[in-house]
Amino acid sequence: MGGGMSGPSFNIDNGYLEGLIRGFKNGILTRNDYLNLVQCETLEDLKVHLQSTDYGSFLANEPGPLSVSVIDDKLRNKLVLEFQHIRNQSVEPLSTFLDYITYSYMIDNIVLLITGTLHQRSISELAAKCHPLGIFEQMEAIGAVSTPAELYNTIIVDTPLAPFFLDCIFVQDLDEMNIEIIRNTLYKNYLEEFHNFCQQIGGITADVMCEILAFEADRRAIIITINSFGTELTKDDRSKLYPCCGKLHPEGLSALARSDDYDQVRAVADYYAEYKVLFEGAGNNPGDKTLEDKLFEHEVKLNVFSFLQQFHFGVFYSFIKLKEQEIRNIIWISECVAQRHRTKIDNYIPIF
Amino acid sequence: SEEMSRIQMFLQHDSAYACVAEFGELGLVEFSDLNENVNEFQRKYINEVRRCDEMERKLRYIEKECRKALNAVPPDNGENPDTPMPSEMFNLELTFEKLENELKEVNSNKETLMKNKLELTELKHILRKTQTFFDEAHLTLGSTTGSESSSTSLLSAEAPVGDQHAPKFGFIAGVIVRERVPSFERMLWRACRGNVFLRQTEIETPLEDPVTGDEVNKCVFIIFFQGEQLKTKVRKICEGYKATMYPCPDTQAERREMSMGVMTRIEDIQTVLSQTEEHQTRILSNSARNIRLWFRKVKKIKAVYHTLNLCNIQKAIIAEGWCPSADIDRVHLAARRGTERSGTDIPAIINKMDTRKIPPTYHKTNKFTHGYQAIVDAYGIADYLEINPAPFTLITFPFLFAVMFGDCGHGTIMFLFALWMVWNEKKIAAEKSTNEIWMILFNGRYIILLMGLFSIYTGLLYNDCFSKSLNIFGSSWSLADTYTTMDITNNTLATTATIQLNPKYTFDTGSPYPLGIDPIWNIAQNQIVFLNSYKMKLSVILGVTQMIFGVLLSFSNHTYFKRPLNVISEFVPQLLFLCAIMGYLVVMIFTKWLIFDSEDSAIAPSLLITLIDMFLFKTHILPLFSGQQVVETLLLIVAVVCVPWMLLMKPLTLWMRNKNLLKTNQGLTVRNVRTVIHSREERVNIVDEDELGVGTSDDVDGDIKGDLDEEVEDAPFEMSEVMILSSIHTIEYCLSCISHTASYLRLWALSLAHAELSEVLWNMVLRIGLVSSTYAGSVITFMVFVGWAGATIIILLIMEGLSAFLHTLRLHWVEFQSKFYHGDGRAFTPFSFSVILDSSDD
């Protein structure tokens, strides 16, 4: 698989799709677009400006008045349409690669449904909130299960997530804490598996994707650690949730497992040049960027870099991630516009 | 191109809308954006644009409903409505609003009815299907009574008459989409650990989805289970799989009764539904008639407001733009009409402005010249007022094409095809085909027409018709009176395959064949050798003529733009260089044709060698004319002198001028001059705006124009830049004189290829039938003809035609236009409703 993947032979199967994705990428909003969007007074203004971008008439058939949720839906629909078009045109191994991208949405959907049912919400209401990329057939029957083992045996076993779930079967019952553990375990296994898969593909895909996935793994490890302070999660359990395909593995992860507060996490990150910078700029004071935003920014940077190389699958992953970020940005701006809360409107993360 | 004027329009708020609408109908004014740094959504008339968007949305909704309900595209009667006035816009909005609401109401009613109907139909099917399940259960029970095997215990248990000690079994019946059945079944099995029993069967007739109207295939299922816990689980799974569950009575009698009730209710709903549908059809068929008209009206309103958004809005609405100077009266007239329409008495004021901005290029075309202009524009839009190559292309393009495509048979087919398109052009244009390739052909119909016509002409000259010659006037070669001299008898003709004819004896010098090539060459063995020499020379003559013509055109460009320096430093040396080398070659070709006849053709010198010898200063063994050596030396010296002339004269003159300018201005740089001019013009504008354009600025602009010479535009002067530019041009021109002449040889090459291909096709395909001497030959010819005709059309007409077209295109773009055409302009895009409506109709 590795040898034939580079150069012109890449184009035999994937050239068209790569071209397509690069075309889509050119439609991503630029800094200038954001500057214009920020000036909008109403959501209608926002619609007018988005009409002059690649989004075109995606809101043209919506009866007014606009709401943020409608914009969100339409933005997401557009992304999903583009993704599905590409998925339908793709052949192995790209199709598997694209499937891997959808798995993370499936994990999110499962967790969303379980938490929802725990809080006695109806399945149909929850299903509407699920990300369309992560929808699978058995999903809505989740209301019928009550333990992780049952969850595995009835639902997960038929989905591609099955191998990721094996570690969670021993969790006792479904409560808030355990759902988080399930989510993170699933995610850890998923990331490691995806990382593995990319390495199997080899070539430039491996170079680009492993970099991005390693960052994703490290980000999760850091966030898990920070969020676990003050909860009843033991250090031992916590360390089991760290994905092991990042740059923090193994020394950094074991140091993270030992840490007790934010400053210790920071001390761990100080050993790694790229993460040190992120922690330095972050703070909770007004005017500072949060650590989360800093991490997002770094992710955007990595994803933009992946377009600098040709003949690899990373562009597909990066496009989806950048588009996600763009949707988050537009929604953030529309929320600020809709609620007339302009002080924080500049907290979006520009891509180009 | 047309001379353009920059116009400034002062429109009153009341009448601006009507005036702009009139300009839109006129389609002769291009509006410039005066608010370039204002965001789209901060412009004055954005609210109106938004209202139009909203109206369009409603119209799209209505149109969609029309398509869905009436199953037909709303008719388009091509009506062109007047632009509605703003007051009318409210009415339109109201109409659409009412229609939309009405439609929405009808639709929601219909949807509820459909939903009810769907539910009832599903229930009907459930009752019918479950009946068979229960019946089967009875049968199985009957056959297995007494058997205590565990495999049948479940079956027997579900029967209502089952064992007394068995716990009560419950069941759920419902309907599910067919695609989900397998996974549904598997999920039930997994979740309930095999403790439920599922029967399912397909509903034969597909049901209609009430929302989308699509057909869906569904299955009826019934699940038996034991105990409450399983019941909730099964219910949840059913919900998860979006299966609809229906109550189903336990006993057969109840089921029958229910089924009767359901049937009557379905019938009731059906009547109501058909009434609703009728109502819907009535509303829709009314609006379907008008929908295109409405669309056009809204498009026009929107276009007008978009244009108004480009204007500068103060006390009055100030618009700026371009229009052809010749049509300025019509613009005035349109503005007056607009003012009248809006009913105000303050007229709109339109002033010509003087500006430094470069006007757009506008060529008036008709349907005949349009295609040729498009060929030129595809290379680059002409600079403003630059010479437009399109009128020359009109003739040279089909001619050069025909030189490569010379066959009067193929030409006739092409001509007839184009004639058919021209004949039916109104009908074809009205069809508005979306087939891109067909539309390209159709838009080029007049080009194809002339190409066909010229091909017939060159075909006659080459004497080529489907690779055969037409012997119309009788060949001028004859053996009749040479029997004696050449020792030929009738016997020789029968025994020898080829005979060499000596023109000295066999050619009738008194009357050469009157039109084109003598048909005897068609059967000559040295046909290709003969034609090659002829076509090669022809290509060079045509090519050099066209290039010299191109250089001459550059002269008229230079004189029009008043650039005497360019005439002396570019045009003259270029022309001399071209004529001295290539022009001389053409002269030699003609001389050679004229002075050698059949007597002494054997000793005629090779032109190629002669030309090479000219560069090497060698003496010719046989001069073409006396004094050839001296003439050649002179020409060569002229050509060599031209090179430094082209290279150095312009940069040096500019350098000298710049030095003098600096001296006289006493350090006042050119840049300062320009800023002075700039501020002066701004002042003029301010005056204009204050007095609503009453004051004229004629006195001021005279001297502004005088200062704005071409040389001033070059400032600040950079010697190295000019030098580099000049050397590039010189090298390019000198090399291109040789390479472009060689490039014209493609005329010969393609012509040869075309002739050979069609001959091969004749000999390899059609001849199979013709050589046979029996009656079977006619049958074979009949069958072979299809292949020959098909190959003629596909290979010779379409493929060869395309290739010849492409080469002609190249000869025009590269070899011809590079001699004079700048092609760096901007096309005139007037604000025109017809363009806007046409583009949005697709």
Image (tube, grey):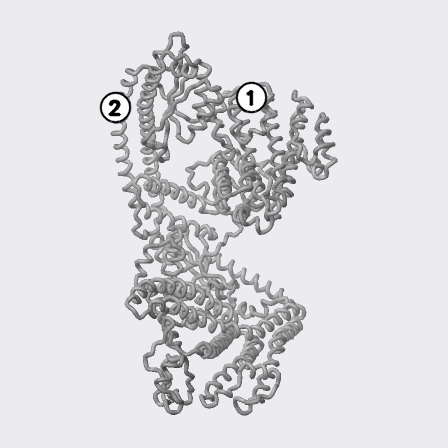
Left/right of residue A22 with respect to residue B344 in the rendered view = right
Question: Residue at coordinates 36% horizontally, 21% vertically from top-left?
Answer: B246
Q: Residue A149 carries which label?
A: 1
The amino acid type of the residue labelled 2 equals Thr
Question: In which quadrant will I find the N terminus of chain B?
Answer: bottom left
Question: Residue at coordinates 41% horizontally, 51% vertically from top-left?
Answer: B303
Q: Quadrant of residue B774?
A: bottom left
**Mark 1 belongs to chain:** A
The amino acid type of the residue labelled 1 equals Ala
B184 or B59: nearer the eye?
B184
Q: Are discs 2 and 1 located on one and the same chain?
A: no
**Label 2, on which residue?**
B264
A83 or B269: nearer the eye?
A83
A155 or B388: nearer the eye?
A155
Question: Residue at coordinates 53% horizontally, 82% vertically from top-left?
Answer: B607
Q: How crowded is mark 2: few (under 14 residues within 10 Å), some or many (20 or more)?
A: few
> How many circles with numbers are drawn on the protein?
2
Q: Quadrant of residue A186?
A: top right
Label 2 or label 1, whichever lies nearer to me, is 1
Please provide percent x and percent y for residue B179. Answer: 41, 31
Any part of residue B3 in sight: no
B151 or B821: nearer the eye?
B151
Q: Residues within 10 Å of mark 1 (few under 14, many from 20)?
A: some
Q: Where B294 falls versus B437 (above or below)?
A: above
Left/right of residue A167 with respect to residue B46 in the rendered view = right
Please provide percent x and percent y for residue B494. Answer: 36, 81
Question: Residue at coordinates 49% horizontally, 45% vertically from top-left?
Answer: B41
Left/right of residue B673 with respect to residue B817 in the rendered view = right
**Mark 2 belongs to chain:** B
Please provide percent x and percent y for residue B626. Answer: 54, 92
Please provide percent x and percent y for residue A104. Answer: 56, 33
